[in-house]
Image (tube, rainbow, N blue to C red):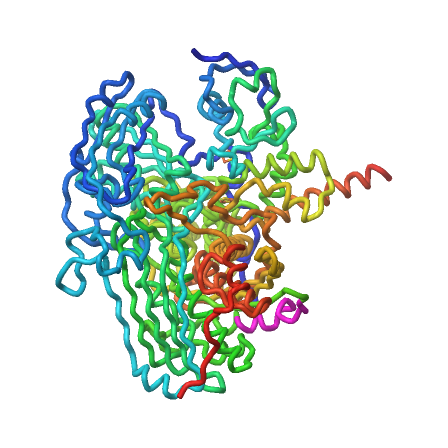
Amino acid sequence: MKTHVTCSVNGDPVEFLVDDSQTLLSALRDELKLTGVKEGCGTGDCGACSVLLNGELTCSCLVFAPEVQNSQVVTVEGLADPDNLHPLQAAFLEGAALQCGICTPGFLVAAKALLDRNPTPNEKEVRYAIAGNLCRCTGYDKIVRSILDVAADLASESETVGE
Amino acid sequence: MTSTSFKHIGQRSIRPDGLDKVTGKARFGADYYLPGMLVGVVVRSPHPHATIKSIDTTAARAISGVKAVITAQDFPEISHEEAMSGESVVDFRDLSHNVMARDKVLYIGHPVAAIAATSQQAADAAAQALQVVYEIHPHVLNVDEAMASDAPILHSDLDPDGGEPTNIAKRHVFNRGDTKQGFARADVVIEREFTTKQVHQGYIEPHAVVADTGEDGRSVVWCSSQGHFLVRDQTAKVLGWERSRLKVIPAEIGGGFGGKTTIYLEPLAVLLSAKSGRPVKMVMSRDEVFMATGPGPGSRVRVKIGATSDGKITAAEVWMAFDAGAFKGSPVGAACQTVLAPYEIHDVSITGLDVVINTPKVAAYRAPGAPIGAFAAESVLDEIAEALSMDPIDLRYQNAVEEGSESTYGPTFKLIGFKETLEAIKEHPHYKATLGPNQGRGVACGFWFNAGLGSSATVSIHEDGTASVLTGSPDIGGSRASMALMAAEVLGIDETRIRPSIVDTDSIGFTDVTGGSRVTFATGMAVIEACGEIVEDLRGRAAMIWGAEPDDVEWQSGQAQHSDGSKPPLSLAEIAGSAAKTGGPIAATASLTARGVGPAFSTQVCDVEVDPDTGLVDILRYTTAQDAGRAIHPSYVEGQMQGGVVQGIGWALNEEYVYDDSGRMENPMFLDYRMPVASDLPMIDTVIVEVPNPGHPYGVRGVGEVGIVPPLAAIANAINGATDVRLRDLPMSPPRVVDALSSELNGATGTPAG
Ligand code: FES
Ligand code: FES
């Protein structure tokens, strides 16, 4: 018996059938073919599968797919709007914050979750906010700098708006 | 230090594959789905050392949805045959036996069967139902156990000294000069012993493959690897197939660090697909990656170094035993060659043992073997500097190799930038910054050969003046950006008009692995050569259009210019637009074996704070200087330097394979195999030194590997600076640090010779 799930993914209404044991990660990848969401461990330890579930940063490998009934899910595929990259995506490109790029979707989602809640984080706050995401290639330096760059842009924008 | 004579090289351009990677579009190994695709799983040994008495597949095959089951019987027996495979030697018989166990299993996780089914559930159920009867043997889990006189023997045919079989697969011996006399000239001699544990490369993407075998018996394979030609050739060898029966399409690769320069799943998927007539996808779980793919070796190492009171090294003796895992072939040979390579030492004696144990077969890991040797040698050098009250950089500088020095492993160095890296660190503000209580500073150096090997490139100019650059080198760290920049430099057009792609094994000439820090150097050389041919062609066509001689045409800034200025210049786009009238399509291919490899050196400094109560070592500040020869794309050079350092930090402080007595890895998940996360680290400062490699048109050396060589010792030396205690066993995890701090027995200090 499969469960019929209705929810919103990246703003679009979607429906799919899953086994009760299937994770949200598997539903996104294997049923919806949203393969930007990556599996690095399946145990909640690498963050490659990060999504926003009702706005909260979540490891999709730790959520059973039937649990997302009527929820809102955002994946890396939903970060950019049709004409523009999300500022974090642009900053990651500009700042060479990826090498192999397998961890990148997870970092972008985690960084968006951070900036949504705290648009002006300091370096330490950035480092703790992405501590659930593993990157084996970069040593995190350029990832942290790219996120701080976006935060600095956000800060100067809000100043300009304020004036 | 940066040359300004280039227009494109040295720019921090946006990588051509970047957009797909930040939007989730890029397809990695596990991202391929084919119609009718089956799920493949591997059945693995639960014992570290056992004889397979029988395998009964009847019950497994009876499960509904199971389409194919394969075991050892389905593989041809091949004899021992060693061949170069990228940087390392592969023995095809061992490779075949590692991919699928034959009469014996040699580690927990060793494949004994593989199953393809219509669903994961069916495949898992079949794996449970498969009956294997084992006769269990005692096992060995490290070099000490393996070399004990009563040790169980893994292979009946390993006897390097002639005589009874042993677990020592090979003995590397290198002697030069007379170390006895050398030590007699020394005023201080220090000898120490070190141990390291197995560590994993830790790429975030597990191994993944899809294979689809057609009616004609040819198979198409999608997989992420560091070399799809290697995958093709090794898979063909293991299956006894002709190479042309396989076409391997490179997926994007989610990290490799050496660990994806061999095959595991590929021949299984191809065979399952051939048997079932359906595409088969296989993806490893993380615990399979830990328990069945290559860790780097564990080791025991002794280093003895003597020096005069004014800091001249007089002699060195090194003894190293590396575990190879279940089959011979640890990187101990490379460790022997690199361990003393940064220094001019005439009298040396180096012995390396390659030892088999009941764990997964080790695989290459970034500068294979070198970090372990450097951990020992650079720790002993630090003690010598301390004993002589010398600055540790001054001691190294005084003995540093330079152009014309004869290396400890044989060749004479051409132009190298080792001393420049030492100077860069000595002059860096980091080196002079003040330290607080419980804080210490350590330095260490590292060497790596870098590799040349075979590469191919095809360059096509399109009618609108844009260009394609095709290579066979998987891009793990932004190498497509470097290819575009080098092509732009030769062609004289903007790099955004150049599209670099990595194409399958049927679409380009043979290309060795992305490894040995070789891609920007060697594949870059092929790109430069092919672009050079294109420029020759374009000059000829311009001459034809002008009715001039090719010699009258110069190529400058992407334009043909008449040497006497009598004609208005013709741009690349203009010449390409009329290609049909000047000889047809414009394309060139280069296939070469890259000579002129330039070795890499790195010097690093690290500040730590040690919590005396918990033993926690906090990395406060880290600076690395490395000779890149020429940084084609500085951001990705820095990225390689930073990534190497951080892998080294993990190795130094936390990472290790922990086995229980039954031979099972106790920590096959990221929670317990603790790799560094962002909150563990500071920024990693980089100084790119550029001493051009005379063997490359643009001076490129490889940059990928050497960065991981110094951190183990740099951190151990910094901990000593903070605590006056030397740690010689990795990892220097909190319990070990606490133990060391509380132990009275911290070895003897340097003893005057004589
Ligand atoms: S795959 Fe979900 S945290 Fe690693
Ligand atoms: S870029 Fe490779 S894991 Fe982060």
In percent of width and height, residue A60 lies at: 53, 28
B480, B645: nearer the viewer: B645
Q: Compared to B129, does B200 lie above or below?
A: below
Quarter of the image that includes the C terminus of chain B: bottom left
Q: Is residue A120 visible?
A: yes
In percent of width and height, residue B549 lies at: 39, 58
**B255 left or right, relative to B4:** left
In percent of width and height, residue A37 lies at: 51, 31
Q: Compared to B666, does B721 lie above or below?
A: below
**B721 left or right, relative to B109:** right
Quadrant of the image occupied by residue B468: top left
**B650 left or right, relative to B321:** right
B325, B235: nearer the viewer: B325
Q: Is residue B690 visible?
A: no
Q: Compared to B373, does B315 lie above or below?
A: below
**Magenta part of the chain:** B422-435
